[in-house]
Image: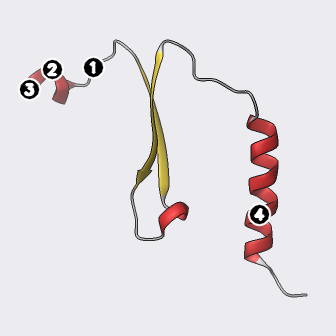
Amino acid sequence: MEFDAEKLRRDFGASDQKRDAGLTTPDNIRRYDDIVYGKYGKYNLLDIYHKKGCHSTAENDS
């Protein structure tokens, strides 16, 4: 049996969309979506969720 990675990605994507339908980000969270971290486009995207009001040392030093 041959493994079909593209079909697996489509199937997982469809399940993810169904699971996540209607979800919203809480008001106390700052959200950064689709940060590119590699050369493979949509396969190298990162989302970051950061609690509002929290600051890193680097931010406080600037």
Q: Is residue 62 left or right of 49 when viewed as pictured?
A: left
Q: Secondary structure at mark 3?
A: loop
Kind of residue at disc 3: Ser
Q: Is residue 58 left or right of 47 when viewed as pictured?
A: left
Measure the alpha-carbon separation of dots 4 and 2. Answer: 42 Å
Considering every residue shown, the one lying at the far right of the view is 1
Look at discs 3 and 4 and give the one toward the viewer. Answer: 4
Measure the alpha-carbon separation of dots 1 and 4. Answer: 38 Å
Label 2 close to label 1 by CB (< 8 Å): yes
Q: Is residue 10 left or right of 59 when viewed as pictured?
A: right
Q: Residue at x 74, y 27 (%)?
A: 22
Label 3 close to label 4 by CB (< 8 Å): no
Label 2 close to label 3 by CB (< 8 Å): yes
Measure the alpha-carbon separation of dots 2 and 1. Answer: 7 Å
- Residue identifier under label 4: 10
Q: Residue at x 85, y 87 (%)?
A: 2
Mark number displayed over residue 55: 1
Relative image position of residue 23 (x, y in whole percent):
70, 27
- Residue identifier under label 3: 62
Q: Residues within 10 Å of mark 3 (few under 14, many from 20)?
A: few
Label 4 close to label 2 by CB (< 8 Å): no
- Residue identifier under label 2: 60
